[in-house]
Amino acid sequence: MMRIDATNITSPLGLTTAENYAAVKRGETGLKVMDGCLGVSVRFCVGMFTESQRAALQVDGCSWFESLVLHSVQEALSHSSVQASSPRTLLVIGTSTAGIEELGEVPEKDKNFLTPGLAAQKVARRLGFVTTPLVVSNACISGATAQMLAQRLMEAGHYDAAVVCGADVLSSFVLAGFDSFKALSPTVCRPFDLERLGLNIGECAATMVLKNDGQGEGWHIVDGCLNNDAYHVSAPIPSGDGICRTIQKILTPELKDAMACVTAHGTATMFNDQMESKGIANAGLGDIPTTAYKPHFGHTFGASGVVEPIITMCSLDEGLILPVMGFEEIGVSGKIKVCATAESTSKRTFIKTQSGFGSCNGSVIYSRESWPAPARVEVSYETVRQVSITPESLRMDGADAPVEASGATLVSELYKKYLSDGSRFFKMDLFSRLAYIGTGLLAKDSLEGIAPEDIAILLFTVNGSVLADRKHLSTYTHPDEYYPSPSVFINTLPNVVLGEIAMKNTIKGETTLVMLPERDERLKEMIFAATTAATRPAAVLCGWVDCPAEDDFFAELNLLKIKE
């Protein structure tokens, strides 16, 4: 188990973990109603730093996102013996959009904008890290995924310590996108309540410093599970199947007996809360208290999977389970026990649940008690199929295939020729089309007989969904031409293609997208080995997909199967 050596929360409620916890315990919120925010002329209730807070946190030469991450990581490290300069210390950032607000200042012809991977590298170098930082972009479960990735790489022996920071910032980019979904509440959100109206967006950075030093004193990450429900890229599965399976995979009878509470995702949207309540109840946790913190912070996306468990650790250290602020009457059908008032407890174990766009789900168990470490066994895989796509070529299993078109038209040609499955292919961005056609070619007639839960997807990229980002940017930057579209905005989350692939091929195992500063085969192989040792899927769709421009892209993907 990984020990949590130090933490930080940097949010509108405070700049330290202690300040944030004290504010939450007092029932305070960092959310406020604004008529128009960051150039988007709609009424929002958001969790936004004040001008004075921003001025204090802003670092010269850094974006707002980078500045927030710098402060949180630096403050957490100041309470730890972990040295950033050690070649055995890793930085992992979990984020949904990173510093996307900077994209509008970069000329469209410039392909060398500051990608999330390069932003992470900039932060890492300023803090003295000498190892290559990793960025996990798994929408709302990015923070949980970052913790799992760090834990696995440490268990594999590559690092002795890891700094995990979940962060996202408020921007017109995100506000306009969620406004297009009509999912935003004009008042402070009320998770699981009958009168809930939707979510609030917040900005935050939260950090955990992890050490691989056995069963030492303090909080530990016991185990975690990630999966895909292969249902819809933006709508939660009504049954709660994905969340339920993540809980069941890691919850032993002994851990259930020790469980103080569930710290839920609790977005306060009509469908996500309903889904999550069903998943928690069906997993057998409906009889223990459920709490949620988004009425205090808003939905902080990549940060939520880090800040929310930190608050629960603080509360359980005081023997308290904090209530869901604003909750009055149950408004979901899943039979769960939502905390309406603070409760006392002597237990020091809890589970954090999350779900997000791209059909992804995650659960992580934390404890102050000692538990046996989950089994991790290195397994061998063999490549059974290969696909390579460039603007001029298609190569399958070592042989060139005939093509007629080139550039983006070639990708459409391949879809019409080989798949043509009635999907929303032509609504996808080029990055997603590349990944979708490449994995589709690999999976075609190759996954029969393998259980959906036993198939995984692990993709790597540098630029991610930058073309979709630019397209969404154009839909709201001119007030007279304000027309943000959910079908455009959804493609700005680079992990959404994982949901498209999962639905196409009925894949319900773990699906993850990792962003790096540059292409690095050594890191890719290291992450693949550590991930498969922890999860042991029977088959994995794995490889690189990158698309910085319409005429500059490649996909190099493999289907690997476990050796018998």
Image (cartoon, rainbow, N blue to C red):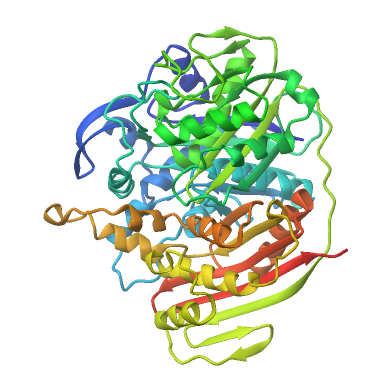
Instruction: Tell me, yes or no, if residue 257 can be seen here.
Output: yes
Tally of numbered discs: 0
Front-lying residue, 81 or 317 = 317
In-image side of 161 versus 56 (left or right): right
Against 424, is 6 above or below? Answer: above
Q: Is residue 284 left or right of residue 466?
A: right
Q: Residue at x 47, y 20 (%)?
A: 19
Residue depicted at 84% across the width and 32% down the height:
372
Q: Position of residue 149 (x, y in %)?
A: 66, 48
Q: Quadrant of the N terminus?
A: top right
Where residue 174 appears, as percent x and y from the top left, is 34, 46
Nearer to me, 380 or 422: 422
Instruction: Specify the quadrant of the image occupied by residue 248.
Output: top right
**Residue most extreme to the left:** 480
- Which quarter of the figure is the C terminus placed in? bottom right
| Residue 519 visible in this rendered orientation of the protein | no
Residue at the far right: name it: 564
